[in-house]
Amino acid sequence: MARNIENYTAQAPSDWFLWAAGASIVGSPTLRAISRKEPPQFVGLWVAPFMLLGVSNKIVKVAGSDRVHAS
């Protein structure tokens, strides 16, 4: 299952995750200026997962799976 996920996510450019994190950084204060409820905090929490996914995506592209597959 991990191999299928790696094959699927390796097709996405790593820049997408960086742009998504940047959009979260910009979106959170923007939502805060518009609304004083929970959505700005929720959107602000997305930065770390997006960055982690970007790093993971880059590692998968460079190193591949953690197991050696005989195929």
Image (tube, rainbow, N blue to C red):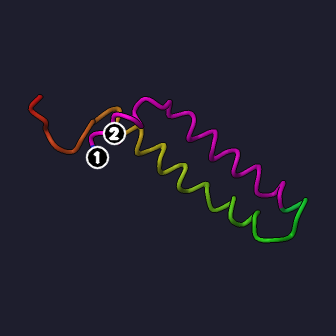
Disc 1 residue type (three-letter)? Ala
Q: In the image, what residue occupies the spot 56% across and 33% down?
A: 15
Q: In the image, what residue occupies the spot 47% across and 47% down?
A: 53
The alpha-carbon separation of the residues under discs 1 and 2 comes to: 6 Å
Q: Quarter holding the C terminus?
A: top left
Pointer 2: what residue?
Answer: 6
Q: Main secondary structure of the magenta part?
A: helix
Q: Position of residue 37 (x, y in %)?
A: 82, 71
Badge 1 vs badge 2, beta-carbon distance below 8 Å: yes
Q: Position of residue 48 (x, y in %)?
A: 55, 56
Q: Residue furthest left?
A: 70
Q: Which mark is residue 13?
A: none
SS at mark 1 in the image: helix
Q: Which residues are magenta?
A: 3-31
Label 2, residues with CA under 10 Å away: few <14, some 14-19, many ≥20: some
Q: In the image, what residue occupies the spot 63% across and 47% down?
A: 21
> Quick check: is 4 in the magenta stretch?
yes
**Is residue 47 shown above or below 15?**
below
Q: Position of residue 66 (x, y in %)?
A: 21, 45
Q: Is residue 27 left or right of residue 2?
A: right
Which of the 4 quarters of the picture holds residue 19? top right
Q: Position of residue 35 (x, y in %)?
A: 88, 64
Which of the 4 quarters of the picture holds residue 3? top left
